[in-house]
Image: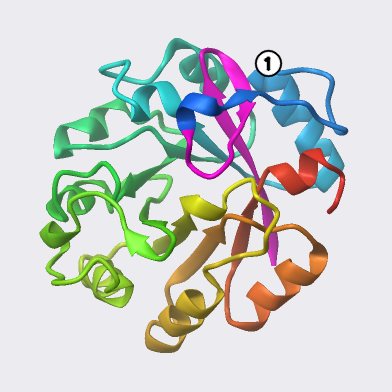
Amino acid sequence: MRIIPVLDILGGEVVRAVGGRRDEYRPVVSRITASTLPLQVATDLLAATRATELYVADLDAIRGQHDSLSPAVVEFLNAVTVPVWLDFGVRTSADVRLVPANARPIVGTETAWDSGVASAFRHHAAGCAVSIDLFDGSLLGRWKKWGVQSPRDVLGVAAAAVAMGVPTLIVLDLASVGTGEGPRTLETCRAIRERFPKVELLTGGGVRSRADIDRLGDVGVDGVLVASALHDALI
């Protein structure tokens, strides 16, 4: 099981995400690092976890405050030495031109205008992922564009992504991010793994302990996205 440290970057600083309420995010306070600068936070998290990859959310880009990657994220990607899963709020196929060579782009259901966007990214040299973005179990964004009839049809979105040849799925429930309440995605991940045994499967939100990570591993998750539990030295 891989632990993948998460950096939520807003206004040039790493912030602590809680419950998807982005207007309330504040600079991170951590037991792992004394900094809020992305590169230093990443360095300290990598040293503490021995992780070999990172997940970065460019919140300025996701919120539409930039037409491209935010300057802080560009600077970070130019300096970081490990692979980065990058969520910058992909909307259209044209956004593929914004992805640096060392980043693995994420097409999130929250922001993508339709499912066809994922097909433009699936051959990116560093790999790509479709993020199935949920809030309390319901799909966010234009979920009907993924060929499903219900916001609860997560398996339908997963099937659409796998049919396009997307190698990695991320299941992220924003309602549980930063809450420490435990992962809400366990049963969803179990169902995805049973139906798609070969897809790489990552998940995040609410992870609070090694026991949570073990439970996710037991249902077939390959990697867990973690932020708050790392900063609180719970893992």
Residue 216: where, in percent of width, then height? 64, 73
Q: Which residues are magenta?
A: 1-21
> Which residue is pictured at 41% across the width and 32% down the height?
101
Q: Is residue 96 magenta?
A: no
Q: Is residue 102 above or below residue 117?
A: above
Seen from the viewer's position, the closer of residues 44 and 13 is 13
Amino acid type assigned to the residue bearing label 1 in the image: Leu
Is the stretch drawn in magenta largely helix, strand or loop?
strand
- Give left or right: position of 214 versus 94: right
Q: Is residue 14 magenta?
A: yes
Disc 1 designates what residue? 37
Q: Is residue 78 above or below residue 8?
A: above
Residue 115: where, in percent of width, then height? 16, 55
Q: Residue furthest bottom?
A: 194
> Which residue is pictured at 15% across the width and 44% down the height?
113
- Give left or right: position of 57 versus 219: left
Residue 138: where, in percent of width, then height? 34, 63
Does residue 40 appear anywhere in the picture? yes
- Split into 4 quadrants, where in the image is the N terminus? bottom right
Does residue 79 appear anywhere in the picture? no
- Give left or right: position of 210 versus 153: right
> Which residue is pictured at 83% across the width and 41% down the height?
232
